[in-house]
Image (tube, rainbow, N blue to C red):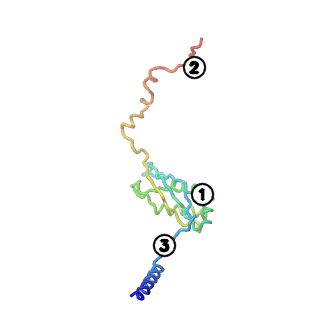
Amino acid sequence: MRPLAIPAILLALAASAAAAEDAPKKKVEEPGTHVQMPFLIAPVSVDGKLQGYVYISSKLIASTPAASVEIREKMAFIQDAFVRDVNAQDVASGPDVSLIDKAALTNRLVTDARRIVGAAKVASITFTQMQFSTLHPNTTTADASAFSPATQQPAAAAKTPAPSPGDSKTP
């Protein structure tokens, strides 16, 4: 029985190795190719009215570690292009301002980065966090009346007049 078990095990191992070679390989990113970008704040408007902001945290993925060094050297220029891009065109998809069109934003930002650093050096971008924040999250009519001009001054300051510059109490 033992003499047959060893060849069967070897045959099973060979079959699993061959199957692993035939399976599509997942692209493994090389270490040192991720470049953390500074936070990006994108305004979101509906019909010309500002509704809030999307706070975006992202990483550019370079094609090689050497390309990531070049991306880091030009990070200020890339960030400037990102800021101009999200302020020129809305990041929301449709009337729901909390839904972000990630595919379109990905294409736009990768295009901006490739224009600055070079097309072969930027592989893609990943978004690590996207958070929508409304402009006035807790505004109610009671909050609005609390900030009216009549209530800006304390009651004591409204009753006592301020001393004029000519009034001096020195003898």
Crowd rating for badge 1 (residues with CA inside 10 Å; few <14, some 14–19, many 20+):
some
Judged from the image, the secondary structure of the residue bearing numbered disc 2 is loop
> Image quarter for residue 117?
bottom right
Q: Is residue 54 left or right of residue 140?
A: right
In the picture, the disc for residue 75 is: 1
> Image quarter for residue 19?
bottom left
Q: Name the one closer to the observer, 6 or 44.
A: 6
Q: Which residue is mark 2?
A: 165
Name the amino acid type tagged 2: Pro
Judged from the image, the secondary structure of the residue bearing numbered disc 3 is loop
Q: Is residue 85 left or right of residue 100?
A: right
Q: Which residue is mark 3?
A: 26
Residue located 51% across and 58% down the image: 58
Q: Name the one closer to the observer, 92 or 72.
A: 72
Name the amino acid type tagged 1: Met
Quadrant (top left, top right, bottom left, bottom right) of the N terminus: bottom left
Judged from the image, the secondary structure of the residue bearing numbered disc 1 is helix
22 over 117 or under it: above or below: below
Residue extending furthest toward the front: 2
